[in-house]
Each structure stands twice: as structure tokens, then as C-alpha cells.
């Protein structure tokens, strides 16, 4: 099962490397990782998504809490949280009909067209994983030239 873990860490050199090292040394794969400063410039928020059973998840959380620069670890899985992802999709639109059809799909999802070329569109979508994945699947028949996506970012609602 996929789990989303949020870590508040000291915003210092080497913290990301130590946390990534913890995962790799134990053979745990990170599905996605997003890191950025919080409202406090001295603290960064790391959102980590991993596919693990409960036993492994518990072990990961315990190991993270032992690291000196980790302030707080929260398992957001199943909690009332806000989660978002950003994806840029370069879509093949070799003719005006394809371009028009792709633009209609993009509009339905309230995504943005951020660049238009002679034979492609670059689409930006922000949303939960399901919304992002659904748009991607609907645009696949046109041909995906390139794809870039962030890791999931998340926080508790309360």
C-alpha cells in the first residue's frame, strides 16, 4: 500500500542525503519525494511517498525519528489531509483537429496550456494523484512527447 509521510526537518546541508541514505541502506524505495522550506526558513517539509506494508512503514518512521535533524514525522495516510501534485505534459498535436481536441480535454480538467508550439502543447495540471493520472491517460492517444512531474506535497487539514 502507498503511504504518505511528512517530515519536518532542520533546513541544513546534508539532511536530505541522510534521509535518502536511510531509505537506500535498508532497501526501501521512495516513490516520490518533495522538499521545500516552510513558513519558518529554518525548517523544511519533506513529503515522502513509499509503497510498504505496515511493518516496514513502522520501521521507517522509527528510523526517521532517530535522525538528529528530524523535528517531526507524521504518517498522513488515511488522515484528513490536502495532497497535490503538479505535472507538465508535452502533447503531440500534429494537426489543428488534434490540437483542438486536446485543448477541450485540458479545459474539462481545468488544467492550463502554458506553451503552444507548431506541433505540440505543454499542459500544466495540479491536483490529486487521480486527477493528474486521469488527464495523462486521456492525452496519451495524442502522443506524449515529454513528461515532468513533482512529487506529492501534503499537509494535515487541521
Image (tube, helix red, strand yellow):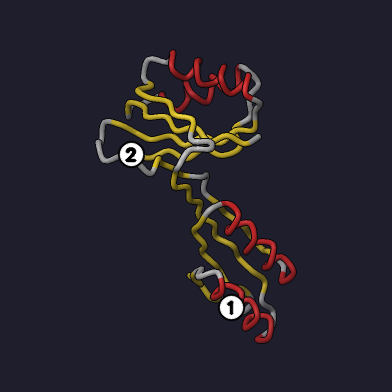
Q: Quadrant of the N terminus?
A: top right
Quadrant position of residue 135: bottom right
Task: Judge from the rendering whether residue 111 lies leftward or rightward of residue 38; answer left or right.
Answer: right
Say which label, 1 or 2, has the lower sequence index.
2
Q: Residue furthest bottom?
A: 96
Indicate whether 96 appears above or below 8.
below
Quadrant position of residue 92: bottom right
Q: Identify which residue is drawn at 58% across, 58% down.
A: 132
Q: Nearer the viewer, residue 8 or 19?
A: 8
Indicate whether 23 appears above or below 110.
above
Q: Answer few, some or many: residues within 10 Å of disc 1's Cα (few below 14, many 20 plus, some between 14 and 19).
A: some
Q: Nearer the viewer, residue 119 or 81?
A: 81
Q: Quadrant of the C terminus?
A: top left
**Residue behind mark 1:** 103
Q: Identify which residue is drawn at 32% across, 26% down.
A: 10
Q: Tell me how far mark 1 sits from mark 2, CA to CA.
A: 34 Å
Q: Answer few, some or many: residues within 10 Å of disc 2's Cα (few below 14, many 20 plus, some between 14 and 19).
A: some
* Residue 82 place in picture, x, y as percent: 44, 47
Total label count? 2
Element type at mark 2: strand
**Residue behind mark 2:** 37
Amino acid at each position: 500500500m502507498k503511504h504518505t509521510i511528512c517530515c519536518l526537518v532542520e533546513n541544513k546541508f546534508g539532511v536530505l542525503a541522510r534521509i535518502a541514505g536511510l531509505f537506500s541502506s535498508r532497501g526501501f524505495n521512495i516513490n516520490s519525494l518533495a522538499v521545500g522550506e516552510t513558513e519558518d526558513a529554518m525548517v523544511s517539509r519533506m513529503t515522502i511517498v513509499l509503497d510498504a506494508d505496515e511493518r516496514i512503514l513502522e520501521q521507517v518512521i522509527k528510523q526517521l525519528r532517530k535522525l538528529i535533524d528530524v523535528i517531526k514525522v507524521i504518517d498522513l495516510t488515511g488522515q484528513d489531509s490536502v495532497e497535490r501534485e503538479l505535472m507538465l505534459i508535452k502533447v503531440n498535436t500534429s494537426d489543428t483537429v488534434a490540437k483542438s481536441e486536446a485543448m477541450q480535454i485540458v479545459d474539462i480538467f481545468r488544467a492550463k496550456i502554458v506553451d503552444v508550439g507548431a506541433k505540440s502543447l505543454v499542459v500544466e495540471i495540479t491536483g490529486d494523484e487521480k486527477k493528474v493520472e486521469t488527464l495523462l491517460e486521456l492525452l496519451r492517444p495524442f502522443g506524449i512527447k515529454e513528461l515532468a512531474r513533482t512529487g506529492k506535497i501534503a499537509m494535515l487539514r487541521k
